[in-house]
Every structure is written in structure tokens, then in C-alpha cells.
Amino acid sequence: MTSIAKPIIPLVALPKNEIGLTIRDYEGAVSTLCAGCGHDSVTAAITHAFWELSTPPHSIAKLSGIGCSSKTPTYFVRGAHGFNSAHGRMVTIATGANAANRELTYIGISGDGDSLSIGIGHLAHAIRRNVNMVYVIENNGVYGLTKGQFSASADIGSRLKKGEPNAIAPIDPVLLGLSMGATFLARSFSGDKAQLVPILKAAAAHNGLALIDVISPCVTFNDHEGSTKSYRFMREHEVKEIETDFVPIRKEIHKSLDENDATEITMHDGSVVRFRSVPTGYDPYDRQKVEEYIRERRSRGEIATGLLYVDESSLDVHELNNTPDHALNTVPYSKLCPGSAELAKMQASFR
Amino acid sequence: MAIDTAQDTAIRVNDFSIKLANVNGTGSASANSLLMQAIFRMGIPVSGKNLFPSNIQGLPTWYEIRVNKSGYTARALEYDLMVAMNSATYEQDINEVSSGGYVLYDSSWPLDQELLRDDVTFLGVPLARMCIENFAAPRERILMKNVAYAGAVVALLGIDMDIVSNLLSETFARNELLRESNQNALRLGYNYALENFECPLPFRVEPMDETKNSILIDGNTAAAIGCLYAGATVSGWYPITPATAVMDNFTRLCAQYRREPVENPAPGELPYKNNYLIIQAEDEIAAIGMVLGASWSGARAFTSTSGPGISLMNELLGLAYYTEIPAVLIDVQRTGPSTGMPTRTQQSDLLLCAYASHGDTKHILLFPKDPRECFEFAVQSFDIAERFQTPVFMLSDLDIGMNDWVVPEFTWDDSYVPDRGRVLNDKDLEGMAEFFRYANEDAEFVTPRTLPGSDSKGAYFIRGSGHDKFGRYTEDSNDYQQVVDRLKKKHASAAAHVPAPIIERHAGATVGVITLGGCDLAVREAVDQLAAQGVIADYMRVRGFPFVPGVREFVEEHDHCFVVEQNRDAQLRSLISIETGAAIESMHSVLAYGGFPLSARQVIDGITSQLEN
């Protein structure tokens, strides 16, 4: 993973967030991805989301696996702690890190190869455990770093630049998540920062694993005619009915007239996610209806985007295991070791 | 039947072996360990080896008990008494009895005359008939047969009946019905033996005072206690024989010792919080991934597994090695390759663990010999892993891990302070101009790390891809080599921190014997017996890798060394030769890899056959 330090040019005019940082403080190194890569837009959205949330950079842990997507954590929040792990294994590391220190904000960046092929087992089980983290799949339908093989998210009939159309069924991470008991499922498009930023913010506030499938076109290997993960295809087939706003806990909630009918969800930390333009009968709490809706759209060749499903009542991995509110790595050793007297007592049972 | 062969035999006290042949899933294990535990409580050195199948019910299973007043309790290959409870293995079992020995069998049915041996005494006890007459429920009739034969053995060996009876009462303290039926069954067998045979037999037990400061414990429990005392808070694991009991015990111990009371719990809230998080992973890859994530975050984390699990973990072990993340792995070795024989023991993961993962890697290994060392080495593993920021493997095995051993009781020094290694906190960072992850090495080639959550000055990007000493991505040869060369030197520095080899030199020694781990008892017995035969040998048991210079010196002091280990390919010999440069030709292998615990006879035969050549 190459990285070039980005020059920090002081601009007086840049606005500051609640902790006095500018957007520049949430940037990282210069991207070495191809010009026009969808992933860079996702990076920009993540940068904005954390800046807007005023998350202290040092309290963020950013992790990734292997692939083009997994390069991107270098490109945002340089003050965050980063872990570029092995192919498909990102979420196992994130699970352990979260187990040891639940106080940080975890964001994992993965790709469709990383998450839907080599790491699909880990993703499925991390969803089941409800590890408290933001899990972004930058989904472009191809293996970019190895020069353009189909990934498991490639649609039937989708064509590579050269060669035969894909003949086998794609894996949809949102449908996978629904069946695994995911508690936060969203889909977005890298070209739509206005939609993605509030989703990322809501994901960070969510108590549990927040999975965001971001269709992020590969300009080099999968942006041609015949591809279903191209900019053009997405612009023509995205159905963006379910729009969301994210209202942080610190902000006073004002409702405008037309928003009075909107669905609102209070997140774990007290912040609010407000749904707009929700289709009639759509219920983001209803696992079955969400699945029907996605499938119905898909049958029409459309891709439903937005925050599609959320269950804020669920327990995360720590609550399920009844651990203390503070990080386990801060428990003093004196509390962890029972000591010599207890050892002597314990050994009475081994006689 | 040749009753009188035994009468000529001199009386042997506290020096014999018995074997119990059973069908698995019938409840024999508890009856067998009852006998072993009773002998232990009589103060006599004893061992019990469970030779069991990878199966839940219906296959042959054996249990061996060796009693030895001098403490030679490695596996014996000859049995003075066979308790033959499995008709499917009668022939084999009866053949294994020493000449002049005894067979106890269930005489509810006649024994095939062809199985009889002239030089062995057959003791028939109508176990099934007695149990049918005395117990009503079908399951009880099967279970109580075991306790009944145990009762007969108690009488035949002169085991203290009060001790056995007390043990049963302790086991069934909370279930009066079971307690009574067990006591009744015990008496049935005991009384039958007293009335019908000349008890005790010529080999028998008499009380000693040798186990007063000892405990009876298996290595998996001991390792779990070590992890508890080391302060481990996170573990990721996947069930696998023979390692599962490590995490079962750790879970149980944590529930007992790691719960912090909550004052005024909210309605529906538990009155305590768990100062630990144990995750049963989806596979061993995830298990080690979780350990790395937790260790990266500064928790003491570990996994327990066996060879197949290590195979799966290889990828992330390379990541841990190269990115310098601590990890503790307890590998309870079993017989490989592949699935191999999951319930049989071996020491065949040495090379796998020493060089786990692709590329140039070297890891730190600890070789406990028994449960006591499992306890001690588990604690040390965490200290070494965090000091050297790298994976540490404790290589136990099925024999150590799953069998009960008599070992000196564990001690704990309350002044122990965990070695957390070089970790910079925010205050340390404040005083620094800049932090670079792989710079500023100390005399042991360790560079300081920071933990996630520390000030942004200490933030860096861990990468398994090529990196320079600043932690930056590199494809530059020199920058790459600088880091991997330091890793090699760092590994070498760990030699001074792993448990030192145990070396015992004997005047007039002509050869050296080298071994490791659970071979210790058998090899010591062999060395003593060889000395009695005039072959005097020096002894070295290696306890850790990387090796200290003393290992090479020991090899070079002797024209001939014998390396005793439990694998086919002489892995310890190779490791010593590769890593110390000691001449491989001077090291002769004695190998036992059939899956059962080592016996002194295998060692003696292995050495003497090569000395003759």
C-alpha cells in the first residue's frame, strides 16, 4: 500500500467542528487509487462524517483487509489508529480490538472480494455477534488489484471488459445481513455523498454492527457498457426512495412541516435518524418487508439505496457478554489475578 | 487355570501397573480415575493414562494406572492386572498381561477357553449378574458395573476402602440416591473379591507419604489457571480435541474469579460484570484474529488449539510476527498429519510452530513437561509475548493436557508484576518529537509500541505489507531488510527469557540424552535404568526455543547424543541442528510416534539398539 503524505495547507477560512478541528484534520495521505475511483468518494464521505460528528481522531480505529478498498484507511483521519490486516480477516481483528477496548469508534473498510468471498464467514459471524462497528463494503463487482476478475457480487449477465458474461448468482450483502440477524443495513452509491454521509453518521451512532454496502465503480475494470456496477448503470438504476437525516444528540431537533410524518429512530447514544421519502408501507424495522422490498426492486432491475433496515433495540457483543462499561484493557491487574491464597484454596479441589 | 503361579511371586509393594479395558460411553472413566485418585490419596506416586477413541459411545477404550514408589510413573507396557471389561478386545488385552499376572473379567458369561493362558490367573467376578440382582434401572445396571469392578480392584490391590468410599461421597455429595447406589456397588465388588480371592494380590499398595505436597491435575486445567493468573482478559477459540478443556476451564475460572459485583443493579441487570470476554469463533482463523486485535489493543489475549488449528492460523501468525503483535497460543498437540488421530498424543507441531506462516518467520516456543509447567509456562508465555511483541506458543500435548498427573502443588508469588513490554502512553508521547513504530530499538531489538486510543501522535498504520523502520509502506530492499533483520535478532534475544534447559551431568557419562516436554519421566527412568546397566548418560531437557548456547554446548560435549521425541521426523533434532549449527550426525534419534504416551522401555530399546551398532 503506497502512501504519499498530503501537504497540509493552512486555510484560515475552514470551519471548525465542535472540538475545534477542520476537515483537514480528518484527511489522510494522498490516494494512489486510479483517478475517478469510487473509493475516493467514499473516503471523502467518511472524512466528512467523522468531522461532522466531531469524533476525536485518536478515538477512531480504522481497519481493513486486502484489496483496493483496503488501501483507503490511509486516506482518511491520519490521527486515527490503523490496521491493514490480511485478506478477508479484517473483522476478526476488529472483533478482538473491540473486545479489549469498547470505548473506541471502529470502522472497517472492506471490498466485495474481501467480504463476500474470502471473508464471508467472518462477516456472517461478526453480524451475528453484533460487534459494535461501522462495516463498509466498497463494492465494485471486480478484483481490481489483480486486474479485473469477477467478484462474488457480480450480477448475472454482467460483463468483464473482455470475456464471457457472469453466469452465477451474486451475493447481496444486505440480503445476507438480513438473514444473519444484522441490526443496521444500508446501501449507498459512492457518487452520492449527500446520501452516504448521514448514513455513515448513523452507522457510527448505531449500537452494533452497521453494514453499509456502497456501490463504488471501478473505473479501470468495471465501468464499461455491460457492467452493473458502473457509474452509468447506477445513475440509471438507483432507486433512492429511502432518504435519511442524521441528527446528533447535541443538536436540538427541529421538525419542519413536511417532516412531521417522517419515521424517526432514536439511536443508542440519543441521536436521531429521521427517514424521509419513505415509500408507503415501508417499515425499516420489519426484516421481512425490507427483504421483500429489496427483492421486488431487484426484480425490476433497480437498486434500492438508503438506510434499509435498523434495529436499535438489539444488544452488542459486550452487552451480550455482560462486560463492564469500561474497556477491558483498563482493568488493573490486581483485579484480574486471584492471588496466592486463592490458588491454595483452589488446589484443595485437586487432591 | 494356573492359580499357583502367583504364589511363587515375591510380594511387590507400590510397584506395579494395571490396565482397565472398557467400552467407551459406559461410564468407566469415573470408576477408573476413582482408583487412581484413591492411590494418590494414600500418598503413593501414581499416574493414570486414558487411552480413548475419537468417539462418544461403543468403541474400545483403556485406562492404565502405574504405581511406583520411586516416582517412575511414565507409561508401562506390561500389566500385572488387566481388568478386562470389553469382550471385543479380550484377546488383545489378555495377551498384554505379564507372565504371572492376573485378569479380572465378568464371569456372568463364560470366558472362551481359547483365551486362557497358563501363566496368568483369571479372576471371575459376576459383575453383570450382581448388578442385575441389585439394581433396577437399565442404565444403572451398566454404570454400577464399573463401580463394582472398582470395588473388586480395591480389595485386590489393598487400596484403603475408606478413602475410596469418601471419594464417592464427595463426588455424589449432592445426590443421595446416586451416592447410595455407588456405595452399594463398590461394596458388592469389594466383598465378592474378599470372599472369593486371596486379597490382596502379591502386588499391592501400602500407604506412603510422597504426595502430601502434590496435587492431581491435568495440563489443560493447569494452563487455564496460568492464563487466569497471567491476567488474560480476552480469548478467541474454536473447539478442538484435545485443547477444548483449556477454554472450558478458563471460562469456569473466570466465572468464579473475574466477576465484579455491581452495586444496586438495575431491574433485569445481573448483579455483576464480567472482567473477561471469551469468544467462541467461527474457525481458528477468526480465533487468532481476535487474539491479535485484543493484543494490539493492549489486553492479554490467548487462544487454545491443536495442530489443525495452528495450520489454519498460519496466515495471521505471519502477520503477527511481521507487524509485531503479541499473542499466546496454547497448542495441545495431537497425532497428525491432517485429522490424524485426534485422541492420540504426539509432539509433532514443533517445526510447524517454530516457522509458522509463509516467508521468513521464527517463533518462540515453550515446552512444558507436565501440568505444573503448563501453569508456570502459561504465565511466562504472556510475559515473553508482550516483551517481544510476537506470538508465543506453549506446546503441550494430549498426554499432558488430558491426563491427570501428580505434580508438586502450584505456588504463586504475589509480588509478580506482568511484563507488559515497551508500550508508550500519552505522557511518553508528549515528550517525543515524533513516534515511529519500528524505530528506537532497545538492546533486545524491541521497538516501543502504542495502543489504539492513545494520542494521535502515537497513531500509526499497522501493515502486513512491506514496511520500513518508520512503519511506512516500502518496496525498497534495504528498508525492508533492515526490519526483517532486526526481527531475526529480536527472536534470538528471546533465548535468555524462555525457560532454560534442564541439564544433568553424571560422572563417567559416555553419551548425552536430549528430550523435551512430556517425555521427561520416561527418559529419566530410562537414563537411570541404563546407568544400572553400565551406560551412563548426561541428560538435557530443552524447555524453550530459541535455544540458549548451552544447548549446542551439550550436544558438542558428547560424541553421541540421543534425541528422544514423539514424532516421526525427528523435529527436535532438526530444530537443534538448524538453529544451533550442532552437527546432526552426532545426534541419533529415538522416536515414538504411535500416539500413546512414551514408556522407558521404548527409550532404552531405542538407545541400546543404536549403541550396539
Image (cartoon, rainbow, N blue to C red):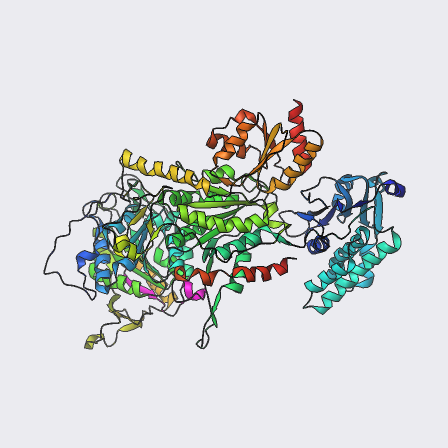
Q: Is residue A21 visible?
A: yes
Tell me the residue at 26%/47% (across/down).
Answer: A227
* Direction from residue B64 to residue B333 in the image, left or right: left
For the point 53% across and 50% down, which residue is it?
B376
Can you say which quadrant of the picture contains the C terminus of chain B? top right
Q: Is residue A302 visible?
A: no
Magenta-drawn stretch contains B525: no
**Which quadrant of the structure image shows residue A167?**
top left
Point out the image quarter for the N terminus of chain B: top right
Q: Is residue A308 left or right of residue B608?
A: left
- Examine the rendered structure and indicate whether residue B41 appears above or below residue A2: below
The location of residue A195, given as percent across then percent down, is 23, 62
Residue A210: give x, y in percent of width and height. 33, 61
Instruction: Name the residue: 77% across, 50% down.
Output: B205
Return the x and y of residue B69 as percentages of the image width and height: 73, 46
In the image, the segment drawn in magenta is: A304-323
Q: Is residue B489 above or below residue A292?
A: above
Q: Nearer the viewer, residue B572 or B266?
A: B572
Q: Is residue B516 left or right of residue B291?
A: right
Horizontal and vertical percent position of residue A309: 34, 65
Q: Which residue sits furthest front?
A: B507
Asked whether residue A320 is drawn in magenta, I would say yes
